[in-house]
Amino acid sequence: MSGCCEPDRNDYQSVFSSRFARRQSRRYHRRGLTPAAQGIVDFAASRGVEGATVLEIGGGVGQLQVELLRRGASHVTNLEISENYEAEAARLLEQAGMTSRVTRRFVDVAQAPDDVEPADVVVLHRVVCCYPDYARLLAVAAAHARATLVYSHPAANVVNRVQFGAENMYRRLTGNAFRAFIHPPQGMVRAAQADGMAVAYRHHAWDWDVVGLARN
Ligand SMILES: C[S@@+](CC[C@H](N)C(=O)[O-])C[C@H]1O[C@@H](n2cnc3c(N)ncnc32)[C@H](O)[C@@H]1O
């Protein structure tokens, strides 16, 4: 990473590789959504996704998008930093017959907020932990959400801290500048609430927590 506020695209490309994308895709085909991802979809659906536009930040191969479109969302815009998901994402959308309902873009919305249109629902699953400036990312995400914002983050517990610490140590030793973060849960909520959103849903698990917010 080049600094606290300007993440380097190449670092993301090396971690979120084609191999990583294939693994995510295989997992989804075999076992469906993870419990945290399912919590995100269920919360968004409970707030109403029929006809809604969705902005997914860091959507990877796009498994959540397929489920939100199945629940009636009209269109999804996916923002990514890594370009390595595209083959798997295209395959997934083609199989689901949803290619025309998703726009995939390479934009870091925290760096270029004005380049991205707002949407009814904004989703970030397993993304805040991959971004150093969580406050900026979540504040921008909230400002782009007309009605609903939902994000997941690693639970701030000992198991995750040890795992993230070990992975970051390995990256340091192998010369990879990417770092993953366990950001402070309350700090993330404060950033997400700054633009008039209020917490409406929480799912706590040992691995990934989900926080859902609704516009007041
Ligand atoms: C752990 S992956 C998760 C991918 C997908 N959401 C999933 O759960 O399978 C995190 C992804 O977030 C993306 N990402 C992180 N910060 C981002 C940002 N500011 N804008 C767009 N994408 C971002 C990374 O490129 C990476 O692909």
Image: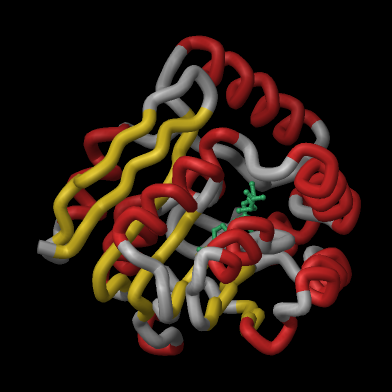
Residue at left offset 71%, top offset 56%: 11
Residue at left offset 72%, top offset 43%: 32
Give 148 or 208, whichever is nearer the viewer: 148
Give 57 or 130, whichever is nearer the viewer: 57
Q: How far across and down, in percent of the image, does residue 51 sit? A: 42, 80
Residue at left offset 23%, top offset 35%: 186
Above/below status of 157 relative to 202 = above
Give the position of the N terminus as an image quadrant.
bottom right
Above/below status of 148 relative to 184 = below
Residue at left offset 26%, top offset 75%: 146
**Relative horizontal placement of residue 159, taking residue 53 as reference (left or right):** right
Give the position of the C terminus as an image quadrant.
bottom left
**Relative horizontal placement of residue 206, taking residue 137 as reference (left or right):** right
**Relative horizontal placement of residue 151, taking residue 72 as reference (left or right):** left
Residue 90 visible from this viewpoint: yes
Q: How far across and down, in percent of the image, does residue 205 sit? A: 45, 22
Residue 131 visible from this viewpoint: no
Give 10 or 102, whichever is nearer the viewer: 102
Q: How far across and down, in percent of the image, does residue 68 sit? A: 54, 64
Q: How far across and down, in percent of the image, does residue 93 sit? A: 77, 73
Furthest residue toward top:
158
Give the quadrant of ligand 1.
bottom right
Above/below status of 108 relative to 133 = below
Above/below status of 160 relative to 53 = above
